[in-house]
Amino acid sequence: MTRRRPAPSWLSDAVIYQIYPASFADADGDGIGDLPGVTAHLDHLAWLGVNTIWISPCFASEFGDGGYDVSDYLTIAPRYGTNDDALALIEAAREHGIRVMFDLVPGHTSHRHPWFQKSAHTPGDDRYIWSERLGAPVCNWIPNQGARGGFYLANFYPIQPALNFGYARMDPEEPWRQPVDAPGPRANRAALREIMAYWFDRGVAGFRVDMAASLVKDDPDHAETGKLWREMRDWMDTAYPDRALLSEWGDPKTSVPAGIHADFFLHFNGRALRSLWDNGTGSQGPWGLGEPCYFDPDGKGSMEEFLAAWKEADDAIDGRGLVALPTANHDFSRLTCGPRTREMVAPAFAFQLTWPALPVIYYGDEIGMRYVPGLPDKEGSQLGTEARQGSRTPMQWDDSPGAGFSTAPAEAYYLPLDPGPDRPSVAAARADERSLLHHVRRLIALRRSVPALGTTAPVEVLSSGYPFVYLRDSSHLVVINPRREPAAFEVSGVADAQALDVSGVTLTADGVRAEGFAHGVFRL
């Protein structure tokens, strides 16, 4: 196998900040965030130290699923502004030393997309997956209202018809299946390149790719989906070698060798992420699924599941890309949720920003915004039992009644503000040097100034219990204790280490002692 070009150096050095645009900052006073609102707050992001922002879907949409139902990939949704606003954001971000990544939804469109409207009325147009009869009952087959008749396959909601990238396996009982090299799948692969090129040419640094593993159907080992992304990666390496793909695949050991630059550990695939912070989507209350996790204040978890998944992924990636580690995202609960308060999450950031993964911070997590339970559904946010809206509330910029998010009446807000009287804000946190915000800022600065704490330096775990203790590049010691009770670990030769960022950790001739909710980063 030919060794693939490594990820661009800027991605290896990135600290990514995810923005849910409807909730971040409202510049035009209609109660919904927008791209000019993001531009207006670039100073905060530059001050914090992030150097890449990922903006959740901002393309034209009917917003039946929060923008993940795209009706035009080349046009910014009017609620968020215009294409000129997008270009202004990209340029202003560049001046702040920040790259902009957009969100790409390749597996389906809105049922209002012109591609679907044409296909729904045109027999033989196979950009989507069609059947003249109702398909397998386990699939999401929707009756077609167009002149073509029949049924189309939807990926999630009925308004999201699945684009046809072919099937990995044929089945005579399902004659609607087409091979991956049929005309419809070929046309969709070409369109995918055209969409990416359009935005790359306008300065977008890369894409977070929604459900990247789902394109080719009945592909149990993702072999054909992997071929598709390798084809895309080969094209990018030639035409756009400094651009990057960050996938929602949730399986870095498979996706990165397939050509993706970086992939997340995610809540829906295995226990790697949940075993760290069990912040699910409120399906059994705001404390995730109630399974053991290491960053539990009662100390009920273990790092073993995470470390096993990390080693498996790291061995498979073999330097060709990165594992991304998010604090949260728009689909699952924030770090501050359930019994875990914002006073308890500093060790989680200390771990995330000193481990050799690609750190992704969800907007507001840097000030300890909490998962807010009990909110109404908004644009498809209530997915079955998963109350995703609790992680999509407006950003809390200041302590005014509207939290600095919008000048609109509160009833016009995209979602209600956190009603808690003690809700944190950027303004209050910036004024307090002891705040979580300043803690995160210091750690980002430390990571960016010390190569041994970045993605490329080796890591050696000394203790996988409480506290979690590891070496970076044999030169830096990190101690993490996310539980309420103190913890100690015996290790020699660390007593004279230089403290770089420490809270509640003491080094002695016998080893380390960590108070509850403590962390320490030391140079040996």
Image (cartoon, grey):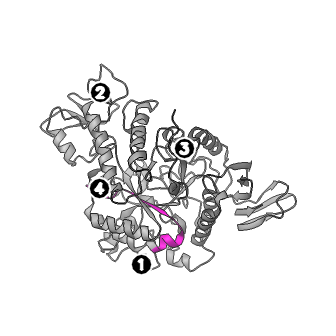
What's under tag 3, amino acid-wise? Arg
Apparent side of residue 465 relative to residue 264 in the rendered image (left or right): right
Assess whether residue 241 is covered by the magenta stretch: no
Q: x, y percentage for residue 422?
A: 53, 73
Dividing the picture into quadrants, the one containing residue 23 is bottom left
Apparent side of residue 140 relative to residue 313 in the rendered image (left or right): left
Numbered disc 3: secondary structure: loop
Query: Which of the pair 344/82 is nearer the observer?
Result: 82
Q: x, y percentage for residue 204?
A: 38, 58
Instruction: Name the residue: 28% across, 66% down.
Output: 84
Start-end of magenta stretch: 43-63
Q: x, y percentage for residue 367?
A: 53, 69
Whichever of callouts 1 and 3 sits on the residue coming sooner in the sequence is 3
Which residue was labeled with disc 1? 401
What's under tag 4, amino acid-wise? Phe
Which residue was labeled with disc 3? 320
Dividing the picture into quadrants, the one containing residue 349 is bottom right
Q: CA distance from mark 4 to mark 1?
A: 27 Å
* Of labels 2 and 3, the one closer to you: 3
Which residue was labeled with disc 2? 177
Dividing the picture into quadrants, the one containing residue 56 is bottom left
